[in-house]
Amino acid sequence: MNAPLEAGLQPYILSDTHGGIATLTLNRGERFNPLSRDMISALQAELDRIAADSLVRTVVIAGAGKGFCAGHDLKELRAHGDLDWQKELFDACSVMMLTLTRLPQPVIARVHGIATAAGCQLVSMCDLAVAADTAKFALPGVNVGVFCTTPAVGVVRNIARKRVMEMLLTGETIDAATALAWGLVNRVVPAAELDGAVARFAEIIGGRSASVIAQGKKAFYAQVDLGLGAAYDFTGNVMACSAIDAAAQEGIDAFVEKRAPRWEG
C-alpha cells in the first residue's frame, strides 16, 4: 500500500510490508527527500495505519535516491510568510516525530547519503539506526539563517550537549564513524551491507514477543525524562506487572525447560 498520491506525481511514501517488516521509503529522491508538508502528512498517515496493524513487527524508515533526508523543504518554507502556516508545519512535524516513539513497533532508520537538519532529527527519533559508512549527518540550519531548534530536541536526546552545540553552531557535517562514536547510530556498515544489517535487527526483534516489545518501548520513553526516583517508581510497577504477565510466564518456563518460547503475540 502506498501513501496518498499527488496529482501527476509518485506517492510521497513507498510502503512495503513483507515478513512482518514494514518499510516506508521517503520518495522524493531527486531532492534528497525533504520533509515538506505533504511528505510529513503522508508519513504520518502510514505510521497511524501501521500502529493498528498487529502483523507488522518492525518498521524501517528509508530514503529513495542518493540520500536519506535533507530536512525541511527550504523552498516551501520561503514561499510561506504566514506565521500560522509555519506553526502548523512544525507542529505536524513534531507530532510525526513523537509518533515514532509512541508506535508499538520498533522503528529502524536505514541511513545512506545525507541526513541533515530535520532528516538528522528523523534518525534521532527512531529507536535504532543503521548507517552506511558513507553517510553524513549535520544540523546546518545556522548556515541559512534558520537555527535547527526542533531537530536539536531529538538529537540532544541521543548525544551529549556540547557535541550537539558543535553541530548547531558550526553547521558542519559529521561522518558515519563520528555519528557512531557519539551515539547517534547503532551500526555503521559498508553500503552493500546496509540492508542486511537492518534485516538482522528486524529478524531479532521479530523473534521476541510483540506485546513485551510494545510494553517495554512505551515504558522506556515514559521513564527516560523522569527524575531518578520517579523513574524507578514507575518502572518498578511496570516490571512487577510484566513479571506476572502470560508472556513472562512462557518466557521463564521456556528458559527453565531449555526450549524456544512460544509467544502468543
Image (tube, helix red, strand yellow):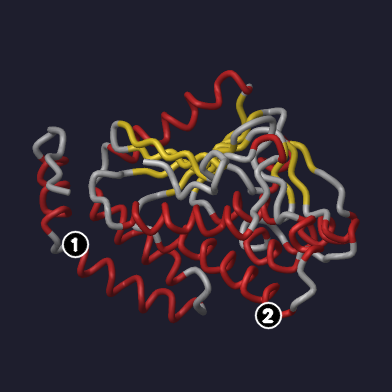
Residue at (29%, 37%) from the top-left corner?
Answer: 20
**Label 2: how many Cα within 10 Å (few below 14, some 14–19, many 20+):** few
Please state if 101 lies on the left or on the right of 219 as rendered.
right
Does residue 252 appear in this view?
no
**Label 1: how many Cα within 10 Å (few below 14, some 14–19, many 20+):** few
Most distant residue in the front direction:
8
Above-or-below relation of 239 to 85: above
- Residue identified by numbered label 2: 84
Q: Which percent across, then down, holds residue 4?
A: 46, 50
Residue at (15%, 44%) from the top-left corner?
Answer: 263
Viewer-nearest residue: 249 or 44? 44
- In which quarter of the view is residue 262 placed? top left
Does residue 15 appear in this view?
yes
- Residue identified by numbered label 1: 243
Viewer-nearest residue: 236 or 118? 118
- State if disc 1 and disc 2 touch (CB < 8 Å): no
Type of amino acid at the residue the image marks with label 1: Ala
